[in-house]
Amino acid sequence: MVQKANSEDAFQQNILVIGLGLIGGSFAAALKSANVGYRIYGYDQNADALSQALQLDIIDEGCQSLADAVHKADVIVLSVPMLAMKPIFQALSVFDLSKKVLTDVGSSKRALIEAANAVFGEVPANLVPGHPIAGSEQSGVGAARSELFVAHDVILLPLQNTDPEALNIVSTLWEAAGAVVSQMDIDHHDEVLAKTSHLPHFLAFSLVDTMAGNPDNYEIFRFAAGGFRDFTRIAGSDPVMWHDVALGNSHAVLEALDEFAEGLDALRNAIVEKDSQALLNIFGRARLARRHFGTLLESRQRRVKKAGADFSARIIQKIDNDRLATANRLATANKVVDGMSTNTPEESMQTFIAHAGGTLSGEFRVPGDKSISHRSIMLGALGEGETVIEGFLEGEDALATLKAFRDMGVQIDGPHQGRVTIQGVGMHGLKAPKGPLYLGNAGTAMRLMAGLMSAQSFYSVLTGDESLSGRPMNRVVDPLTEMGAEIETSEGGRPPLKIRGGLSLKGIEYHLPMASAQVQSCLLLAGMYAGGDTVTVAPGIVRDHTNRMLSGFGYPVDVAGDNGSQVTISGGGKLTGTRIDVPGDVSSAAFFMVAASIAKGSDIRISHVGMNPTRSGVVEILQLMGANITLENESIVGGEPVADIVVRYAPLQGIEIPKRLVPIAIDEFPVLFVAAACADGQTTLTGAKELRVKESDRIQAMADGLIALGVDAQPLPDGMVIKGAGTNTQSVFGSGIIDSHGDHRIAMSFSVAALRSGGDIQIRDCANVATSFPDFAGLAKRVGMRINVIDGVNDDALPADA
Ligand code: S3P
């Protein structure tokens, strides 16, 4: 039904934007800049807006009458306040719209649908409701920017009768504007948006209004610091637009306000009652959720960066050339300052500037073990009674697991200085989460939880950030399916995992195709719920924390075979709450072991590190290379061997890494490659194909970085050959810029390399270091490394030869 209406050029599409404010103006500007055969018409009752849009060159033609405008248009974009929708529909209804596509940009849809029903008797099939998730507290066409939507989400909300061709046309328009298009159900959209967007705006308006009405308002605003400013930025938004949102989406907005008021009441009561525990719980839970959410924002920014890079380069350049000159001439043009959208994606990233040189000294601890921290939450949640964890890793990965179990109704207090208290709900006490469980960057959480979720009585969805969404999950989905689970994945067995639940699992005997503790652990956790025995056989040594911890929680497992590679569990048992002391993570300690081994004069003691023999391959490899590492104060804490690791500088030699050590040092190879580059002679690693499917392709990421810094490194399909520069070469690495690919261990490894570099190394995309090692840079600095962390990228700090 949708045909080209009026174009003289058969390939030209005529787009009419009705309402030239920030959003309408920006959409017009984006389509015009895209330069792909659109002719952009504008219509606005405000003559100034129309002439400004022409002067700014964001429309091709301004229409004086609605009749003229509609006549010319193939697609009509309605960008007017929500409650103006009905009068606009009434005005439009006198024209023949049957060959045109209509769409809108409003932030809630109930009012749009009601207006369409009232005027047309139904929602026309050629009306495609849309909502771009981008904006600014600025308003008016002077604030319009053609790059506003680049790599931002746009939600289209087709109804059952929506014409697919119309949907396709609108979708193409948004893609031409650089947006990432997705679809959603209208009611759900309005509920979600009431919470993520509308509620915060109303709170900001209300806070500013209330404080401005306080007799002390001058003092309040005068002394207001960053918190007040950040919280209230959006109170500068367009009152008419938000008036319409409040009334247009009143049902969902009232629900959100009530929910918020309940939370506020609980906080108020806790203060009245002087209930410190309740206050700490509220603030602690919120802080964690905010950090967790922050990770989601960061990972979204990374996606935005990738999706938007090409587009921005092409379009923004054009805007700069074509439009800024015009814009500058306009005295009325506003200066756009948009806290969210003027930040380029790079600015939201974290960069490490690792300055050359340094010597390490001192005694210190590293954060708690990641593998044990994940498992302690999972087993504690399913245990009967209380579990108290000390030394819990407050890194984003482990916190994602904690949050997921909270989302399934488990009461978890903390972490407060590494202490977490869990009120276990028993094997069958988890509750269905209200939405997908977002696990950030945490592969361990996703793979282990796939096993647990398969055995629950409810449906669940496990999602993750961009990196995790690219990692293979078939390695757990296949055997779980054999056990009777039903799991839907995305293409190629990637997340999200949609897990049916409510099915009975049966024990199987499974020979793992790869030496993976995550796969073995996943099956053991599922095996607790399965009928009969689940037998897992790994083709080598894999970390055995799951078996040890299951035993610690009173659930028997049978360990047999070479090096304990066969682990069997019988279904139907139970877990009993316990105390867990999480030792320092040997994978985090590894960065300092290598650092002290390559930086002359270094002498350090890393205390209380987990020395589980299925994890300590890095110590053995470094010792084989000649490192001066000794273990002191060895003891067993909570079933896990623990020791202080003392490292003094020593010259290193290249070696062929024994195959048996590969799975038990799998996470440490990135930094071991740095050690190899400093050693005399050649180091060869093979049999480590798994490195290609970690948080990044670690073979490629490390080879690229090492080669960029001048190291003789040759990647292999399953490892790497590195010719070391040798002990006598101080500047093993040149200066340069490294892309960590958002992989924490790549970022930290190249920070260590700077100890032997000839100039600064700038490592980009480092925010994910916080997944396993919060404040790595701070600790590294305190013990003698020279790392500065900056937000964004710093071109001024580029080394001269970069
Ligand atoms: C982990 C197992 C390893 C490791 C990961 C943590 C675990 O992965 O790389 O960082 O806690 O079970 P694989 O099992 O995939 O080798």
Image: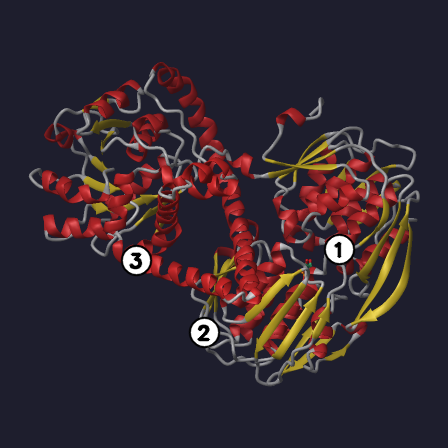
Q: Is mark 1 within 8 Å of ligand 1?
A: yes
Label 1 to label 3: alpha-carbon separation: 49 Å
416 or 469, nearer to the observer: 416
Mark 2 neighbour class, 10 Å CA radius: few under 14, some 14 to 19, many 20 or more: some
Amino acid marked by disc 3: Leu
Of the image marks 2 and 3, the number of the one nearer the N terminus:
3
How far from the left and from the top, in percent, is residue 107? 30, 46
> Residue furthest toward the front?
215
Q: Residue at x 10, y 48 (%)?
A: 119
The local secondary structure at tag 3 comes to helix
Residue 576 locus on image (x, y percent): 65, 81
Which residue has dot 1 on it?
587
Q: Is residue 574 visible?
A: yes
Which residue in the protein does label 3 denote? Answer: 254
Whether disc 3's CB lies below 8 Å from ligand 1 is answered: no
Against 223, is 592 above or below?
A: below
**On the rendered structure, is 144 left or right of 102?**
right
- The quadrant where ligand 1 appears is bottom right
Q: Earlier in the sequence, mark 2 or mark 1?
A: 2
